[in-house]
Image (tube, rainbow, N blue to C red):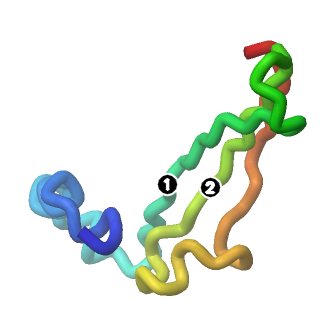
């Protein structure tokens, strides 16, 4: 699997809602969450959770470029 659009689940969604795929204005977004310890210290109890939105309408080689990923939310808190 090179990209999420190659997965079997993605194909099932396309089969079930084929009208969505044929709509020229459809938009496929993915939510990415990554837990980060900003100080690189495993003993600290501070964590940072950036949530990003990825546009999957782009070709696979463009999906993970910085210009096509949007930071939606930053969750601060203790781990």
Q: Position of residue 12 (x, y in %)?
A: 13, 55
54 over 48 or under it: above or below: below
- Image quarter in which the N terminus is found: bottom left
In this rendering, would 63 be left or right of 66?
A: left
Picture quarter containing residue 8? bottom left
- Image quarter in which the C terminus is found: top right
Q: Residue at x 85, y 18 (%)?
A: 44
In this rendering, would 13 be left or right of 33?
A: left
The residue tagged with tag 2: helix, strand or loop? Answer: strand
Q: Position of residue 70 (x, y in %)?
A: 72, 61
| Residue position for label 1 | 30
For the residues labelled 2 and 1, the Cα–Cα distance comes to: 6 Å
- The residue most toward the right is 39
Question: Of the residues under marks 2 and 1, which one precedes in the sequence?
Answer: 1
In this rendering, would 7 be left or right of 34?
A: left
5 over 74 or under it: above or below: below
Label 2, residues with CA under 10 Å away: few <14, some 14-19, many ≥20: some
The residue tagged with tag 1: helix, strand or loop? Answer: strand
Query: Of 28 and 45, which appears nearest the observer?
Result: 45
Q: Residue at x 29, y 68 (%)?
A: 5
Label 1, residues with CA under 10 Å away: few <14, some 14-19, many ≥20: few
- Callouts 2 and 1 close, C-beta under 8 Å: yes
Query: Of 17 and 77, which appears nearest the observer?
Result: 77
| Residue position for label 2 | 53
Q: Position of residue 55 (x, y in %)?
A: 54, 68
Q: Residue at x 47, y 67 (%)?
A: 27
In this rendering, would 74 be left or right of 14?
A: right
50 over 47 or under it: above or below: below
Q: Position of residue 76 (x, y in %)?
A: 84, 25
Q: Residue at x 77, y 41 (%)?
A: 73
Which of the numbered marks, if any, corresponds to residue 62?
none
């Amino acid at each position: 699997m090179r990209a999420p659009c190659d997965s079997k689940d993605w194909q099932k969604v396309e089969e079930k809602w084929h009208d969505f795929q044929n709509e020229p204005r459809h938009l496929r977004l993915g939510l990415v969450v990554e837990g980060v310890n900003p100080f690189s210290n495993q003993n600290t109890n501070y964590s940072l959770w950036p949530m990003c939105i990825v546009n999957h309408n782009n070709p696979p080689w463009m999906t993970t470029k910085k210009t096509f990923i949007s930071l939606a939310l930053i969750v601060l808190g203790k781990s």
